[in-house]
């Protein structure tokens, strides 16, 4: 057979493609979130699973509705998996025993206001999940800070499945008996900073906190996968955690009674979740390595400042949104030097190499 | 020797083994050859044979015209049956002036000048022989080689770099050439070096071609001025700018020639052609072509007379196993889709690659994630996602300001894009548009100058007429008085 009919609308090179594709990127992110998700569900029981399901359902339904209203290809866009990722990240940031409408409302807000009004995936300026987190925190401060102590699945105190439905869908908040304060609370209310064995609990996650943000080990495992697979650039987490730790160390050296130690800052709140899964959302992050370092360092510094001197014990969402907004400026100012040109864009001077080196 | 790293680049799957493992085969003489008059960058050659005329192998069919051009020779002996339009090996499929030669099967060579000791020739003589042999850059760019040699007279050349990178996937013609003809290649390299007056020579070969490296090292061992350099396999290593940076650590300043920083780059295939032209006075009438891709039944490298229709080559290689999704001339990163199999092999044809649908891996486009992978791999340091957004919005001037003109069209950005955006496609369009606008601007400027000149001329004529009239009336006054 030597016959062949050429395509009437020829395509330009390259005629081969690498293996990366957006759905595969999103699948890897979901895989990387699996340890934190599983740990969260195990620690906080069935109500946590309800939260995850509702948040993802809220995001996917809102995405489908927005696409239908905009008359855009439904299956193709939903297939990119980004709505599922947003839903899962949002759920992992919420209090594990929150009422049913919180994740649903948050998910819909994240997708509609955070993403689709800008034109969909890649067009949004701000991180949708963090926008929803801030909107919920400002609107429903009580529900958003109703932390519970971990009640590991199948342990004696853990709620059963039917009980979990009552917690999620019931009008009552979590029983006072299980409500608790997070490790970062002493930053605002005073008291002893966690140290020694309490820090180990932070590493494992057996402390009160957001659904998927308490276990440092689970988050580190997922983050390591993302960096190893080159799904996220290493510059953002490195600069973020480095800056946060450095600032904490400096102030902790000056006055250990007032300023929390670096490990508490790194392990105690949403810093690890943010460093690997939230700040690294490419849509709102700079595109150059040095831009990413600036971006990460900026978030780290803002997290420290908000936690230490701001009105909220946790500043991750605010910090990410502010730096998201600064990304176009960072990208404008930090550009790679072009081949054969000076940084200014002028051609390099002609340098001749006369010696025989 | 120190190797410098260039920015960006990718590691595409090589897919070179299916063709690299076979010795170069020789294509049986095709019945008809279609020899385009434009096979190089610059002016097309001017035909100097007539329809019906019998020509001998190596006889000049068309001479070069203008400063950048190359002559075209008969790849075999036979009769000129037509001079006219034939499909060009270009995606447009537009016809170009082509000489059709019907072979007589005799392969009867024209009387050539006797072989000489090539190193007794002067630089001007070497350059003249290269020009008369119709040699162009065989790496794919097809820039007349003699023009590059002559550039060495204006700019002293410190380093000659021989490009054995062959960084495009699938292509192995240079690899096989170096393995099987290392001695001739090295002699050609020495001739180019002496033609340029280069002080040192570096033959750069990617480390995925260990046999070629070995063969070239052995062949160059006796010549202390030549270094065979093992360079990392990273696309686009074979691009002139990236290769110059890798070997010398210097960048070619924007808008300048490599010769201006004392570097000249030639391909290994060109070196072999130079050896044949200068030592044996044989013009460039054939070349090695890689017949690759998953749809070719017997992939291999083939020596092919210039002008052979691609269909003959495909048939020689056993035809297609499946209907290919794309048939390319050149490699898959920068090659072009063929408009049909009747298009001929030209001097710049490094390969014919017939890709299956699975290899071409076409996926539907999605939205740009702003992930910056394109920025990471761009060897020029551009921000492709920003350029693409502007080109799509029709803001070509903004794209030009962001450095659109510096784009190499290497395709690294499009290769890694997880949204499968046709970035290189958009950039080729934008570059064409920028060139067209510049041309339109130049024409408008010319028109303006002509109109201005006409206005001045008319004004001068009117003034002259008025002056004559007034002179005449004053004459009349004189007569009347």
Image (tube, helix red, strand yellow):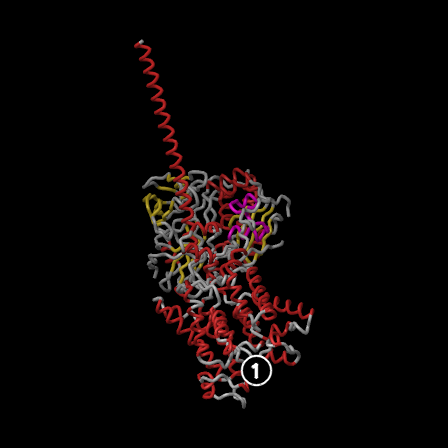
Residue B332's place in the image compared with B42, above or below, is below
Which quadrant: the C terminus of chain B?
Answer: top left
Residue B314 visible to the viewer:
yes
Q: Nearer the viewer, residue A317 or A43?
A: A317
Query: Which image quadrant is residue A255 in?
Result: bottom right
Q: Nearer the viewer, residue B121 or B71?
A: B71
| Residue depicted at x 47% and y 39% | B113
Q: Residue B422: where, in percent of width, then height?
A: 42, 59
Residue B35's place in the image compared with B210, above or below, is above
Residue furthest right as drawn: A254
Q: Residues within 10 Å of mark 1 (few under 14, many from 20)?
A: some
Which quadrant: the N terminus of chain B?
Answer: bottom right
Q: Residue B20: where, in percent of width, then height?
A: 48, 60
Answer with left or right where residue A10 lies relative to residue B150: left
Query: Which image quadrant is residue A222 in?
Result: bottom right
**Where does the magenta region start and end?**
B239-263
Q: Residue B245: where, in percent of width, then height?
A: 57, 52
Whether the magenta-drawn stretch holds residue B218 is answered as no
* Element at label 1: loop
Whether the magenta-drawn stretch holds residue B240 is answered as yes
Residue furthest top as drawn: B481
- How many numbered discs sit on the rendered protein? 1
Residue A35 visible to the viewer:
no
Residue furthest bottom as drawn: A156
Residue B346's place in the image compared with A170, above or below, is above
Q: Nearer the viewer, residue A216 or A184?
A: A184
Check the residue under mark 1 and report the chain it is in. Answer: A
Q: Residue A17: where, in percent of width, then height?
A: 45, 62
Residue at numbered disc 1: A180
Q: Nearer the viewer, residue A112 or B268?
A: A112
């Amino acid at each position: 057979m030597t016959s062949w009919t050429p395509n009437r609308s020829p395509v330009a090179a390259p005629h081969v493609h690498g293996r990366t594709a957006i759905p595969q990127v999103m699948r890897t992110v979901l895989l990387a979130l699996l340890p934190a998700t599983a740990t969260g569900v195990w620690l906080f029981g069935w109500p946590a699973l309800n939260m995850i399901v509702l948040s993802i359902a809220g995001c996917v339904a809102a995405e489908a509705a927005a696409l239908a209203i905009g008359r855009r290809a439904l299956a193709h866009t939903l297939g990119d998996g980004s709505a599922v990722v947003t839903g899962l990240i949002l759920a992992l940031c919420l209090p594990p025993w929150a009422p049913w409408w919180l994740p649903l409302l948050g998910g819909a807000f994240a997708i509609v206001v955070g993403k689709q009004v800008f034109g969909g995936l890649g067009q949004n300026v701000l991180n949708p999940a963090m926008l929803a987190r801030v909107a919920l925190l400002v609107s429903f401060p009580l529900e958003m800070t109703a932390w519970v102590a971990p009640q590991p699945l199948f342990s004696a105190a853990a709620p059963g499945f039917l009980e979990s439905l009552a917690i999620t869908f019931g009008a009552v908040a979590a029983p006072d008996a299980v409500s608790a304060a997070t490790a970062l609370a002493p930053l605002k209310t005073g008291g002893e900073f966690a140290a020694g064995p309490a820090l180990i609990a932070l590493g494992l996650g057996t402390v009160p906190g957001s659904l998927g943000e308490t276990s440092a080990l689970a988050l580190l495992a997922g983050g390591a996968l993302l960096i190893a697979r080159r799904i996220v650039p290493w510059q953002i987490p490195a600069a973020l955690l480095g800056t946060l730790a450095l600032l904490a160390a400096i102030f902790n050296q000056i006055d250990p009674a007032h300023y929390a130690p670096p490990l508490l800052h790194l392990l105690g709140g949403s810093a690890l979740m943010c460093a690997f899964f939230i700040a690294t959302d490419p849509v709102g992050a700079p595109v150059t390595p040095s831009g990413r370092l600036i971006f990460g360092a900026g978030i780290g510094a803002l997290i420290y400042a908000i936690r230490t001197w701001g009105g909220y014990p946790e500043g991750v969402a605010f910090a990410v949104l502010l730096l998201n907004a600064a990304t176009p400026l960072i990208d404008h100012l930090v550009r790679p030097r072009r081949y054969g040109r000076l940084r200014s864009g002028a051609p390099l001077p002609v340098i001749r190499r006369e010696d025989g080196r | 020797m120190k190797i410098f790293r260039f920015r960006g680049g990718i590691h595409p799957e090589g897919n070179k083994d299916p063709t690299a493992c076979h010795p170069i085969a020789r294509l049986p003489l095709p019945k008809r050859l279609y020899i385009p008059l434009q096979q190089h960058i610059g002016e097309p050659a001017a035909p100097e044979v007539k329809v019906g005329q019998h020509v001998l192998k190596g006889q000049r069919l068309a001479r070069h015209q203008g400063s950048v051009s190359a002559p075209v020779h008969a790849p075999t002996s036979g009769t000129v049956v037509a001079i006219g339009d034939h499909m060009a090996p270009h995606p447009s499929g537009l016809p170009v002036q082509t000489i059709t030669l019907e072979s007589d099967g005799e392969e009867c060579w024209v009387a050539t000048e006797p072989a000489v000791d090539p190193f007794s020739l002067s630089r001007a003589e070497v350059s003249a022989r290269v020009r008369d042999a119709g040699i162009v850059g065989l790496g794919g760019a097809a820039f007349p080689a003699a023009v590059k040699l002559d550039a060495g007279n204006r700019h002293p050349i410190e380093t000659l770099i021989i490009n054995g990178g062959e960084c495009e996937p699938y292509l192995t013609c240079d690899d096989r050439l170096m393995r099987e003809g290392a001695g001739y290649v090295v002699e050609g390299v020495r001739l180019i070096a002496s033609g340029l007056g280069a002080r040192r020579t570096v033959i750069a070969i990617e480390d995925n071609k260990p046999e070629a490296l070995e063969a070239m090292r052995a062949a160059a061992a006796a010549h202390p001025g030549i270094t065979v350099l093992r360079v990392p396999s990273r696309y686009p290593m074979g691009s002139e700018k990236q290769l110059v940076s890798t070997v010398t650590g210097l960048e070619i300043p924007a808008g300048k020639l490599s010769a201006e920083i004392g570097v000249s780059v030639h391909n290994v295939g060109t070196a072999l052609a130079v050896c044949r032209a200068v030592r044996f006075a044989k013009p460039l009438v054939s070349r090695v072509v890689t017949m690759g891709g998953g749809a070719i039944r017997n992939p291999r490298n083939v020596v092919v007379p210039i002008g052979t229709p691609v269909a003959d080559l495909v048939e020689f290689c056993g035809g297609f196993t499946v209907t290919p999704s794309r048939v390319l001339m050149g490699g898959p990163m920068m090659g072009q889709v063929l408009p049909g199999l009747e298009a001929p092999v030209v001097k710049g044809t490094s390969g014919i690659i017939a890709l299956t649908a699975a290899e071409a891996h076409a996926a539907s486009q999605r939205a740009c994630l702003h992930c910056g992978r394109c920025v990471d791999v761009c060897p020029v340091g551009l921000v492709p996602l920003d350029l693409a957004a502007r080109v799509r919005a029709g803001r070509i001037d903004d794209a030009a300001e962001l450095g659109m003109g510096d784009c190499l069209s290497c395709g690294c950005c499009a290769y890694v894009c997880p949204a499968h955006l046709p970035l290189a496609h958009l950039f080729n369009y934008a570059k064409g548009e920028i060139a067209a606008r510049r041309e339109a601007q130049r024409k408008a400027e010319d028109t303006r100058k002509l109109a201005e000149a006409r206005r001045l001329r008319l004004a001068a004529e009117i003034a002259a007429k008025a002056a004559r009239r007034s002179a005449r009336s004053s004459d009349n006054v004189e007569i009347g008085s």
